[in-house]
Image: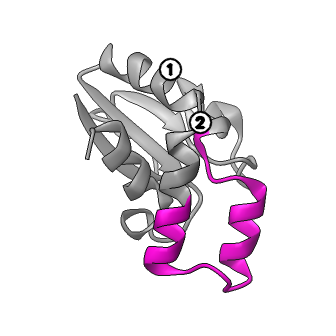
Amino acid sequence: MSIRLARIYDAPGSDDGYRVLVDRLWPRGVSKERAELDEWAKDAAPSTELRRAFHAGELVGDAFDAAYRTELADNPAVPALRERLAEHPTTTLLTATHDEQHSYLAVLRDVLEGR
């Protein structure tokens, strides 16, 4: 299973495979048709409380990553998501975040890959 990260605002690629939006809120300005999603896994995104703490500057960097990993460890949506993703050779996790490579998606990818 190969997991890629991308922004929902980027045009879908022919090599994206299974496309999963991982955000609690629907991204502004993106229609469901344009997004070309296979799944919206909002339950695997950081909780509202964790997201607010991040945006307020209360949790940044490694502290945020650790808090998110703790949430993921107790989140029943994660094993279910892992099972669905295992059915696809390539998955692209999508977010509205500006830098998907240095966001919670990288933490989620590591957890889904067992790292």
Neighbour class for label 1 at 10 Å: few (<14), some, many (≥20)? Answer: few
Neighbour class for label 2 at 10 Å: few (<14), some, many (≥20)? Answer: few
Q: Residue at x 67, y 86 (%)?
A: 57
In the image, residue 111 sits, relative to residue 103, either above or below, namely above
The quadrant in which the N terminus is found is top left
Q: Residue at x 47, y 64 (%)?
A: 66
Q: Are marks 2 and 1 in contact (CB under 8 Å)?
A: no
In the image, residue 64 sits, relative to residue 11, either above or below, namely below
Q: Earlier in the sequence, mark 2 or mark 1?
A: 2
In the image, residue 83 sits, relative to residue 55, either above or below, namely above
Where in the figure is residue 42, as x and y percent of width and height?
Answer: 66, 39
- Tell me which segment is drawn in magenta: 44-67
Location of residue 113 (image quadrant): top left
Who is closer to the viewer here, 92 or 115?
Answer: 115
Q: CA distance from mark 2 to mark 1?
A: 10 Å
Q: Horizontally, is 22 left or right of 16 in the view?
A: right
Looking at the magenta stretch, what is its main secondary structure?
helix
SS for callout 1 = helix
Where in the figure is residue 21, as x and y percent of width and height?
Answer: 56, 40
Q: Amino acid at mark 2?
A: Asn
Q: Does residue 27 appear anywhere in the picture? A: yes
Q: Horizontally, is 68 left or right of 4 in the view?
A: right
Q: Which residue is mark 2?
A: 75
Q: How many marks?
A: 2
Q: Amino acid at mark 1?
A: Ala
SS for callout 2 = loop
Q: Residue at x 60, y 33 (%)?
A: 41
Q: Which residue is mark 1?
A: 80
Who is closer to the viewer here, 64 or 28?
Answer: 64
In magenta stretch: residue 12: no
Q: Residue at x 53, y 44 (%)?
A: 72
Where in the figure is residue 61, as x and y percent of width and height?
Answer: 46, 79
